[in-house]
Structures are given as structure tokens and as C-alpha cells.
Image (cartoon, helix red, strand yellow):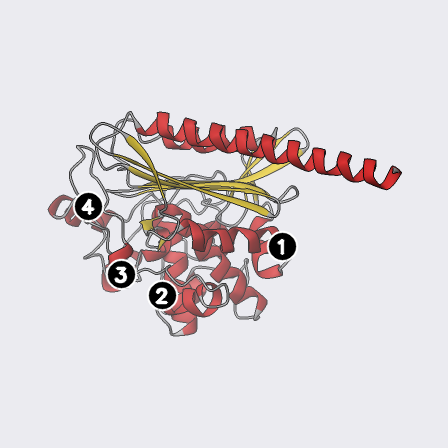
Amino acid sequence: MKYFKNTCIILSLISLLNLKAQEKNKDYAAAIKTFVKNFPINTELSVLVIDGDNSKFIGVKKLKDTVDVIDNNERIFEIGSITKVFTNILLSNSIQKGESSLNETLQSNFNFKIHRGDSITLRHLANHSSGLPALPSNIYNQLEKTPDNPYQHYTEHDLVTYLKKDIQYDYKTGTQSSYSNLGMGLLGYILTKKENKTYEELLKAVIFNPLSMNYSSVNSIHKEKLVKGLNENGSVASNWDFTDAMVGAGGIKSTTKDMEKFIRRSFSNDPLYSLPLQETYRKNKVAKIGLGWQIIDNKDKRFYWHNGGTGGYRSCLVLNKESEKAVLVLSNISAFHTKSSSLDNLCFSLFKKLMK
């Protein structure tokens, strides 16, 4: 009789927990559907919520008069600057193999003189404290000619030409941290030269193939699964193409299903994924930077996050390693849409709900 009573109590608790989980999932879906209403027709979000062993995929798409829940966890989006986290996993891999060091200099990777190249290390490139500007000065003419696909014609030759010139730095190396696509693109480029492989080949060897991230790539070979990006006016946007000169700053396309595997490995104590999570630069008591990862310390909890944006897509990822909780939002909202930054707010609000 006592066994029967205990079993009933356990089943009641399980039922209650399942009910609460269903209510929370409905809350997530409602918040996402409300968010999408402010954006153009055909706006699509693919959301992943990880809570320990449980993963919830929520997809929504805005049609003419409705916002429908859809299954899109294997649909492909550009993830933009979340790519920078992957670039630093590649750096970690090079360090694990003894082929790179955080303290090695930019200059040591080139056979020509780079202005202040001896003072910049791979650590500075990885945590945005190099002093390099956001973009190389010789890219702007190309940006004006092809604004819908701004990086497609910026080649390795262009990058080397820029490095050979008298670079104008924004600040003294190591004195502050200021976001630099140039610095992260340069880091990715250095890693490809060390391995004599393309960035795509490195990603496949180190991350995509080991994690079975079968629909993730730079070149998006599964075009039938690619969600069409939208520009700021809601028209179909051009996808962004990269050469190896800048691809490490923002060139990856992926799915929430694939990204779940990447996030779960980031929860582990695998040195390959743990090294980039270590703090390497402190902006203030709350905001820090690892290698690629942005870090937030809130009371006794540490959160890792990164967002991304391209001409047709916007993304955001935030996680807490200790509790193994994470929220990822992929979308076809343009980074140039006037309300695109609100996607970060959605991601963090869902994460706050998850952490309660």
C-alpha cells in the first residue's frame, strides 16, 4: 500500500512537471509569435530552447494574416557573427595541437613588415583588443559597389595589401576592446594558412563532421533547405558570400538542429570548447570577453552569448554552462531592419524565463 501511494505521488509530480513544461512552451511560442507580428510577411524564426536534457524547437512564420507555428529546425539560416565563436574553436584546436599560441604575434605569421604587428597577438585578435578598426580601409569602395553582398570580392590579396600599408589603429593594442570584423577575419585567415586548408575544410574537420552538423557550411550546399533572407523592406535579400580573407568574421550558415549539437558540446568539459570560454579581457565587473565569446557575470551566474547579423538575417545565442540552459534564435530578419536589435531582447527574455 505504501509503495502504491509513493508511486502515485511520483506520477503526480511527473504529471505536474509535464504540465508546467507545456505551459512554459506555450509561453515561449506566444512570445515568439507576438514578436514576429512587427516584421514583414514571410519573416521566419527558428528557436531552440535547451533545458538540461530537454530541447524544444519552436518555428514560426508570418503569413499574410496569420503567424503559423512550423517545423523548421532543419532549415538553414545565415548565423552572421556567431561564426566568430566557431573561429575561436578552430584557434583552440590549433593551440591543442601545439601549432599556435595565444601569445604569438600577428607579425610572426607574415614575411613582410606589418605596422605594430609585433605588439598584436592572437589573443588580441580573438578578444577584439588589437586596436584594429572594424573593417579594413580598402574594403569600402567594394561595399559601395555591392552593398547587398559586401564581402564577396574582398580577397586574400586585398587583405595582404592592406596589412602592408601603414595601418591606422583606433587605439593602443590591449588598452580596450572594440568589436572588429577585421581582427576576427584576420584570425580565421591566419588559421587557414597554418593548416593549408580553406576555412570550410577546417570547419568540417574540426567541428562539423565530429558533431554531425550535416547542414552547416559556408557555401550552403543544401540550397533547398536555405530560408530566403529578407532585406529591411521585406524583399528577398542576397546571401552574403565570403573569401577566406574575412569569412571567419561571419560566413557560416546553419540550422537550430545542428546548433543544438554545437551548444551541447560547449556545455561539456572538452578542452577544445572550454578554452574559448575562459575570460581573457575584462571590460567591467559585468561584461567580459573570452575568445570570441561575450561574457556576462550576473551575481553568481556566468552567461556566454553572441549575436549576428547580415543583410537578410539576424541571430542570437545565450547559454549558461553550469545549468546547461541555452536559447538560440535564428531568423531571416535583416540586420538593417530598424527593429532588428529587438531580436536580442527576445532571446534574452526567453532565456530569463528559462532560468527562473
Residue 61: x, y in percent? Answer: 30, 37
Q: Which residue is mark 1?
A: 268
Q: Residue at x 42, y 64 (%)?
A: 203
Judge depth for marks 3 and 2 and give the one in front.
Answer: 2
**Residue 82 versus residue 27 in the image, above or below:** below
Residue type (three-letter) at the residue carrying disc 3: Thr
In the image, which disc is placed on residue 180? none
Residue type (three-letter) at the residue carrying disc 1: Ser
Of labels 2 and 1, earlier in sequence is 2
Please, which residue is most extreme toward the left here?
145
Which quadrant of the rendered structure holds the N terminus?
A: top right
Residue type (three-letter) at the residue carrying disc 4: Tyr
**Relative to the observer, which residue lies in front, 64 or 339?**
64
Q: Is residue 178 left or right of residue 154?
A: right
State yes or no: discs 3 and 2 in contact (Cβ < 8 Å).
no
**Residue 291 versus residue 305 in the image, above or below:** below
Q: Is residue 221 left or right of residue 271?
A: left
Separation of residues labelled 2 and 1 (CA atoms):
24 Å
Separation of residues labelled 3 and 2 (CA atoms):
10 Å
Please, which residue is most extreme toward the bottom here?
196
Judge depth for marks 3 and 4 and give the one in front.
Answer: 3
